[in-house]
Image (cartoon, rainbow, N blue to C red):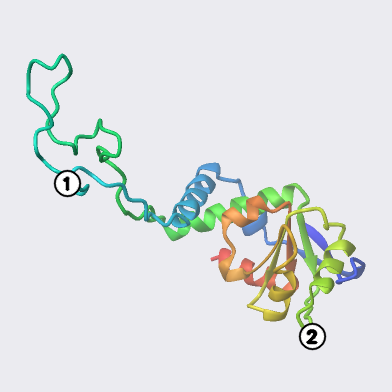
Amino acid sequence: MELEVLNTSGQKTGKKIALAELVFSIEPNDHAIYLDVKQYLANQRQGTHKALERSEVSGSTKKLKKQKGTGGARAGSIKNIQFVGGPRAFGPRPRTYDFKLNKKVKQLARRSALTYKAKGSQIIVLEDFNFETPKTKKYTELLKSLQLSAKKTLLVLPSNNSNVVLSSRNVKNAKVTTADSLNTHDILSASHVIFSESGLKGIENLLSN
């Protein structure tokens, strides 16, 4: 598959670039995508939830009332779980939700996600560019020239560019990442994935091995 290379004004530069078949034209594996996205979301969880259990709440352990003859259910400690303000049985404890996922599965997931985007004509290639200073207006004009102002976009650069990142930070539904930080979740959640020429080469080098 070949794509036209555009400039920052949205005009064709006359150059075409071929997408690597090993990255953008494979048989998608939906289960690999599921596992990779599941791991990404699990890693976002702090896991700091905590509820007090019976041994941790304050209160007397004295028996509240006599065992029989009250007409009600027997009750021992005020720290029983059925009382208001009491503890929680088997409450959540701090834990980590992350789990191991093989590198090859993660690569397969990214290739599968990029294949879906390529089939849906949701990939755009821009010639390499840079902003002299951080300016949100420049980034909004870039998206407007690509007719993506109302879309959720993901721009992939070869390496971190602070001026471009800062320019996009206040733009709604716009995210900038690098080729080595690209993940399946971000690819799928974006309406369009925009690659700079160098960024495209970078991701192809990473995923073609």
Residue 175 visible here: yes
Is residue 16 shown above or below 49? below
Question: Which residue has dot 1 on it?
Answer: 55
In percent of the image, x 58 and y 53: which residue is there?
A: 185
Q: Earlier in the sequence, mark 2 or mark 1?
A: 1
Q: Position of residue 34 (x, y in %)?
A: 51, 45
Give neighbour class at mark 1: few <14, some 14-19, many 20+ (Cα, 10 Å).
few
Image location of residue 115, percent across then percent down? 66, 51
| Amino acid type, residue under disc 1 in the picture | Ser
Q: Position of residue 98 (x, y in %)?
A: 39, 55
Residue nearest the observer in this picture, 32 or 165: 165
Three-letter amino acid code of the residue under disc 2: Glu
Instruction: Say left or right for 44 vs 70.
Output: right
- CB under 8 Å between discs 2 and 1: no
From the viewer's perspective, tell me whether residue 73 is left or right of residue 85: left
Query: Is residue 205 in sight in this rendering?
Result: no
Does dot 2 land on a helix, a strand or a loop?
Answer: loop
Residue 205, located in which quarter of the rendered image? Answer: bottom right
**Residue at image x 63%, y 77%?**
159
Q: Is residue 29 left or right of residue 143?
A: left
Helix, strand or loop at mark 1? loop
Q: Which residue is mark 2?
A: 132
Could you tell me residue 198's position as x and y percent?
A: 71, 75
Q: Does 73 appear above or below 28?
A: above
